[in-house]
Image (cartoon, rainbow, N blue to C red):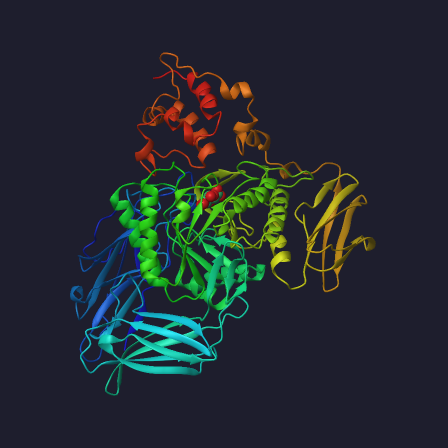
Amino acid sequence: MRETIPLQDNWRFTRTDAGLPAALPEDWERVELPHTWNNIDGQGGAETYYRGSCWYARTFRMPRQPLDGGRVYVELPAAGQQAAVYVNGQRAATHEGGYSAFRADITELCAAEGDNLLVVNCSNAYKDGVYPQTADFTFYGGLYRGVNLISVPEAHFDLDYYGGSGLKVTPRPVEGGAVFALESFVNNAEPDYTVLYSVRDPEGREAAAGTRPADSAAAELFVPDALLWSPDTPNLYTVTATLQRRNEAVDEVSVRTGVRSFSVDPGKGFLLNGVPTPLRGVSRHQDRLYKGNALTAEEHREDAEIIKELGANAVRLAHYQHSQDFYDACDELGLVVWAEIPFISVFDPEPAAHQNCLQQLTELIVQNYNHPSICFWGLANEITIGGMNDKIPENLRALNALAKRLDPTRLTTLAHLSNVPRDSVMHAIPDVIAYNHYMGWYGGRVEDNGPWLDEFHAARPDLCLGLSEYGCEGILTYHGPEPRCKDYSEEYQALYHEHMAKVIAERPWLWCSFVWNMFDFGAANRDEGGVRGRNNKGLVTLDRRTKKDAYYIYKAYWNPEPMVHICGKRYAQRAGERTVIKFYTNEPEARLYVNNDLVWWSKAESGQRVFEHAVTLCPGRNWITVRTPHASDSTTLERVEAEPAVYALPDAGERAKFTGNWFEKLEESERTEELTFPEGRWSVRDTFEALCADPAAFAVINKYMKLATNFPLTPGEGNWKQIHDKSPEQLRDRLPEGFLQVVNRKLNKIEKP
Ligand code: GCU
């Protein structure tokens, strides 16, 4: 029978490009897997984060099967971002893409007796054609999902096809039960081998079983009265395929699956098992504070539990393939998944880049086919950020066709940049579409979201529309009585989400909505709100310790358990006699007390979740309590002369001027001002290449490109190939109005060296 041996400990590691060692390098650092080398510097712990080549090594004894010796595979569930695997000095495998599993048959490279040397060279250096190329998250390097040896008999379920399990299960509900279509792929079987399939119900009882010859192992089993899978009833069936010969079980694989049907309708939204079930959820990245992406199975599970506790019924696993542990948790807890590949932000027209996307999509689908939680394959995210061209739809069409060929049972989708037009040719490619909107943060007002969605829906009643991202930053230090966009306060984030939660609740036809993001995450290139290296749009902090106020607004909407949450517990010192108490509850009535005196009794209007009431504070400490029929919450606020200076982001004013729709705030004359090109000075007519070569000009162009596009300029990386020989003036169409004028004025002041 097969044996899976985790190789977790006794690794040697060097954060240098040391080259292939001939023997175990005793002087390298000892590490355990999962491991990343960017756990600190990838989250703002250092000026820059290390992106380069690193080496891991350890020894192992060759596992043997009792009779025939069998085959030995090495399995890497992920290696960030490019990897080469060596056994005893010989190359066994290479892999490009940091999020999917791959394996290599290393039988012939192993010595039967004594130690074998396993070496993995991992690199997270930028590489042309390997996705992601540029994106708003840290590209952690390392063996962050462990390494396994798999020992199998000569005859075994396939391990060679894109990291898949060798067993595909497709259940479908039918009258009186469900049909399980089963396919397994067996290698090296003799004619007298058979495959026995067994289906066990959620209680572990066998519900159906049947046998097929190993060389044509496709089968169908009928399971009477099968229980359906849904977020409220995540019933899982276990399917085991056993390769048998005479009275022996030679090899075996087990997967879990669920019976459900789903569809999306432009007017009705998402339907699960025939019931309208708007998908209301969050996005998730796979990292934690100072652990980077090297998470344990328990940490993945805990993340899923926090999402479930919020009351979400869906999760978008951005922007790449996540750990099997996480998809398993979604199956078990009942979270519908949007899974995707890192075809993001930068469109690279080179055929090699397209091949890399096809490969990553194949791996995503083959490796995750059996998870009932997954209903959507995401083909790309904001792929037009560098501008639209004919090649983009062509590549998306090929990706869509591939997804349909590998898995006709699921729907495909795309996450669009806000400015993608209503009549874009891209809308006809996937089954359903969705937009990332940041009105109320990067640009526009939060009030613009509802009308935008309604107008799009009215203009394109043929399209199934979803909200693939929306969110804003919230940092626990910043507070104030008048929250506003770009102040990074916990209060503005809460205000923004109060509005969005309502907009979304009022539009059940939106097939999905995903908060960006459930957790703060590492984004090494960022420097926001006084926090370097992070994106702070999480409802929960990167260390998973603190739920921001915005978390509770969704809990009030989505989790039916009675709750009440008083906001502003960190806004604990308040100036002035009067202050507004805000609380969220899903209960029909609430009583507000100050120092144990009832000051307000509120009754909810239908659907109301947010309540506010101004109260008078006594000098010093005040107990603020809210009681609802089944819950209560309480906090203490101090009345002070002046609120602490740390409540305000030091340069909030300056930031507000240059972020969001900063260009809209320009005077008409500033926007239309004529461009000048003085001799010997920089201007927007110079190429990015030339501008970036002069530190003074680079400082200007980099700052404004980052403001306008959200990405800093990284010469040599990302979309550099497409833009380096162009001038900002030539990219006019893709830049906000007023950009050229503002930047040109600054550049004109700098003399060319
Ligand atoms: C984008 C993008 C995310 C990013 C987010 C943000 O739309 O898809 O990867 O993190 O916006 O700016 O926070």
The residue furthest bottom is 247
Which part of the image, by quadrant, shows the N terminus?
Answer: bottom left
Residue 446: x and y in percent read: 59, 41
Question: Does residue 97 appear in the picture of this structure?
Answer: no
The residue furthest top is 679
Residue 280: x and y in percent read: 54, 56
Q: Is residue 48 above or below residue 158?
A: above
Which residue does the image show at 29% across and 54% down from the upper left? 359
Residue 66: x and y in percent read: 22, 80
Question: Residue 30 versus residue 47: which sits nearer the camera?
Answer: 47
In this rendering, position of residue 111 left or right of residue 496: left
Which residue does the image show at 55% across and 28% down from the upper left? 664
Q: How many marks?
A: 0
The image quadrant of residue 383 is top left
Question: Residue 25 versus residue 193: which sits nearer the camera?
Answer: 193
In this rendering, position of residue 598 left or right of residue 710: right
Question: Residue 115 versus residue 267: which sits nearer the camera?
Answer: 267
The image quadrant of residue 697 is top left
In this rendering, position of residue 247 left or right of residue 343: left
Question: Residue 246 versus residue 259: which sits nearer the camera?
Answer: 259
Q: Is residue 112 above or below residue 349?
A: below
Which part of the image, by quadrant, shows the C terminus?
Answer: top left
Residue 724: x and y in percent read: 32, 30
Question: Does residue 712 appear in the picture of this structure?
Answer: yes
